[in-house]
Amino acid sequence: MGGGLKKHDAQVRPVTNRAQAAVALLVLVVGTLVYVLDRPAEQLPLVGIINLSEVLPALFGPVGHSLPTFTHVFAFSLLTAAWFGGGQRVGLTACLVWFGVDSAFEVGQHPQIAERLVQFMPGWFGQLPVLHQTDSFFSSGTFDPGDLISIALGAAVAYLLIRRTAPKDDRRG
C-alpha cells in the first residue's frame, strides 16, 4: 500500500506512504467543512471568507463540536507518519507527539492556565503571521474535556490505520 524503503544511489530513504497521506488530506477537508458549514465566520478568519453556517442548517450537529480536534490530531499524525515512510514505529511516535501537542493546546485554553500562559508570551509573537493570534487563542478559547477525549480517539484511530497501512515489511502482529 504505497510505503516502505527504496534504494537509490546506495542510500536508503523512506518513501512517502501515499495511502496514509490521502486519508489524512481527506479528513482535513472534513474538519475544515465543520468551520465552513457549522461554525460562525468569526471563529476562523481564513475560512470565514467562505462560510455557509448562516444559510444552511448545521450538517455535523453535536459531533461538530469536537470533530475538528479529532481530525487535527488524526490527520497530522497520519501526514507525519506518511512523510517518514508510514511505518509503525514512526507512526506511534507521530501519534504520541500530536496527541501531546493538541492536548497541550486544549489544556492551555483552561481559564486558570490560559491567564498564566498569556502573561509569559513574548511580545514579538505579535509580529509573526501565525503566532500573532496565540494569546487570543488561549485567552478566548474554550477548554472542553470532550475535546481531550476526541484528541485521544484521533490519535488512537490514526495509529490503528497506520498499523493497517504500514509497509508489509514493517507490520507486526
Image (tube, rainbow, N blue to C red):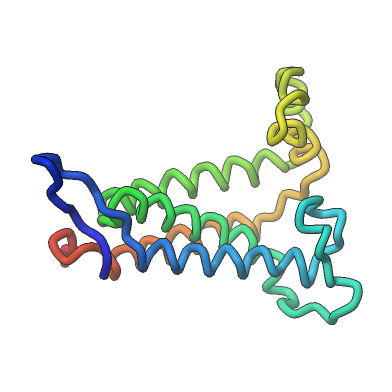
Q: Position of residue 146 (x, y in %)?
A: 65, 61
In the image, taking residue 76 as reference, residue 55 lies left or right, namely right
Residue at the location (85% across, 80% down)? Answer: 56
In the image, taking residue 159 as reference, residue 15 lies left or right, namely left
Nearest the eye: 40 or 25: 25
Q: In this picture, is 20 found above or below 83?
A: below
**The quarter of the displayed image where residue 128 is located:** top right
- Tally the marks: 0
Nearest the eye: 8 or 173: 8
Nearest the eye: 134 or 52: 52
Nearest the eye: 145 or 135: 135
Q: Where is residue 70 in the image (x, y as percent from the top left)?
A: 57, 62
> Dividing the image into 4 quarters, which one contains the C terminus?
bottom left
Q: In this picture, is 100 found above or below 129?
A: below
Q: Position of residue 154 (x, y in %)?
A: 50, 62
Q: Where is residue 80 in the image (x, y as percent from the top left)?
A: 41, 50
Residue at the location (20% across, 57% down)? Answer: 4
Residue at the location (81% across, 64% down)? Answer: 50
